[in-house]
Amino acid sequence: MNLRMLLIGASLSLFAADTLAQVPKPWVGAWKLNIAKSTLRSGPPPTSQIDTIEAVNDAMKFTSDRVASDGKATHIEYTGKPDGKDVPYKGYPGADTISVTKIDDYSNTWVTKKDGKPAATGGTVYSRDGKTRTLTYTAANAAGEKVETIAVFDRQKK
């Protein structure tokens, strides 16, 4: 193997390692809201919610399908790197951008914004056993009061 091939191989390995570092493996998967384990204070709890996180190139694609207590379905999505930069947040009327910042392979912080102003701030922790994802965040309820919500999600089997 010549030096050029070795350098190309090393560069590709570093690129692959950097790509994998962008979206930690514990984050990837389908997650179902466990209403019984959650403390949902920003409004009536949904009847169901499934969040899906996929690694796409060097970013993550997040989708959330939720059915509210009134039966209305909502589909939310964004694609971005966990680097703290704002990306479009589609499908939720209370926010138009989100930024996610990776703390480590098992946690992150995030901020949603509406018209450039913070709408919700929070963090996500993934359990070491890979079975649970917990979001803790602060947002305004229907009365405009800031309330903390804890949403617990269970990993779904493939």
Image (spheres, rainbow, N blue to C red):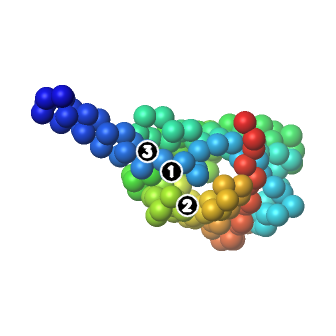
SS type, badge 2: loop
Residue 39: give its label. none
User: Which quadrant is home to the N terminus?
Assistant: top left
Instruction: Name the residue beneath numbered marker 1.
Output: 24
How far from the left and from the top, in percent, is residue 74? Answer: 72, 39
Instruction: From this view, report whether residue 125 is shown above or below residue 24.
Output: below
Sequence-wise, the earlier of marks 2 and 1 is 1
State left or right for residue 16 relative to residue 8: right
SS type, badge 1: loop
Structural crowding at the residue carrying mark 3, measured as other residues with C-alpha within 10 Å and reported as few (<14), some (14–19) or many (≥20): some
State left or right for residue 70 relative to residue 18: right
Residue type for callout 3: Leu
Q: Residue at x 79, y 60 (%)?
A: 43
User: Which quadrant is home to the C terminus?
Assistant: top right
Estimate the spatial distance between the alpha carbons at disc 2 and disc 1, rounded to whole Å: 8 Å
Q: Which residue is more in the foreground, 118 or 28?
A: 28
How far from the left and from the top, in percent, is residue 31? Answer: 71, 47
State left or right for residue 127 relative to residue 108: right
The quadrant holding residue 73 is top right
Estimate the spatial distance between the alpha carbons at disc 2 and disc 3, rounded to whole Å: 14 Å
Instruction: Name the residue beneath numbered marker 3.
Output: 20
Pointer 2 with pointer 1, Cβ within 8 A: yes
Residue 106: give its label. 2
